[in-house]
Amino acid sequence: MWPFRKKTVAVPEDDQPEIVFDPFLGDAGAQRLSGLLGERDWPAARAIIDNADPAAYGFYVGIASSKQGLQEWIDDAIRTDPDPVLPLLVKGLKAISWAWEARGSGYANTVSEEAWKVTRQRLTLAENCLDEVVDRDPKNVEALAGLLTLANARSKGLDELTRRYEAVLAVDPVHTDAHRAMLQALCRKWHGSSELMFAFAREKAAAHPGTALPGLVAAAYLEEWLDRDRDYDYLEGPGIGDEIAAAAHASILHPDFRPGPETPRLWNTFAMALSMSDRLTEAEYCFTRIGDTLVTRHPWNYMGKPGPKYQKWRSWTQATLAP
């Protein structure tokens, strides 16, 4: 079904109020951290990361490593910090996103040779930094997860990806970002296949109820939908909505689930997959929690402009459920 042939929404996309994306997902500590990094106050920024709740630590490290301009001064922090592991970690993770800035978002055949050269240099820098972190702190799970991402980016192959993934699991069996990275690696567009991707998602979902990992099932269906040239009929196929809803009940709707600072990303993934597969009660649960302030660009950007697409599917879900 082409979107909104049946799912007609009264409010056109262009008339919807603009969504403002919050990179901090409503977390005041993350916002303070970003401000301190903007002032290049590494000691104060480090104190926020060091004192973070364990559930927020990876999120805060991610906020730090995504700070614009960080690469211009983080070497000073590495030189002056008595324990340079954390600034080295942040530098290494920053170099990954910095590499993609050089590459750009176009198809590979549109990237210039000079851009490829800079991209490879920055990925090498990232790997060197993260290797040094792991040499100093072998159980640094954020560095291990970063090395997993790099294995995919540098086309190391499934054997090396699996080795690095298992190194993360040895420290944290439910590390969300590592599982997302492995799911991406197992997509057909990278190193795997639909069969490998779904087998991985279902295995991890079954093994870890009450966590974010059942969300891998929803993410896998969205990847498959994208791979099928955004075939909207696909997600309405027999049993698909039921499986995605079951994953939601094993994750965000499970009595043991505890929301964390990154949970809005999970709500958005489920909201898109559930609404597209006509599981509207569960989708509305997600839309209610996301509201207008916790919308994430991914996965709505798979459809086009993420803000208007989010609003349109939310409007349709709410209108359809209304008595």
Image: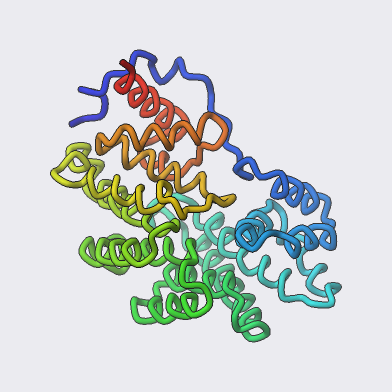
Q: Which residue is at 75% across, 60% downward?
A: 72
Q: Which residue is at 69% across, 49% downward?
A: 30
> Which residue is the extreme one toward the front?
255
In screen coordinates, is 315 left or right of 224? right
Locate residue 125, reporting x and y percent: 61, 73
Locate residue 55, reporting x and y percent: 60, 60
Question: Can you tell which quarter of the image residue 300 is in?
Answer: top left
Locate residue 71, reporting x and y percent: 71, 61
> As rendered, which of 223 and 170 lies closer to the eye?
170
Q: How many marks?
A: 0
> As rendered, which of 140 and 147 lies closer to the eye?
140
Locate residue 292, reporting x and y percent: 53, 29
In screen coordinates, is 289 left or right of 58? left
In screen coordinates, is 106 left or right of 69? left
In screen coordinates, is 126 left or right of 275? right
Q: Quadrant of the N terminus?
A: top left
Residue 276 higher or lower than 138, as above or below: above
Q: Which residue is at 36% across, 29% downward?
A: 313
Residue 191 higher or lower than 235, as above or below: below
> Which residue is the extreme one toward the bottom?
135
Residue 30 higher or lower than 176, as above or below: above
Residue 302 higher or lower than 126, as above or below: above
Q: Quadrant of the C terminus?
A: top left
Q: Which residue is at 44% across, 18% downward?
A: 14
Colour mapping: rainbow
Question: Can you tell which quarter of the image residue 207 is in?
Answer: bottom left
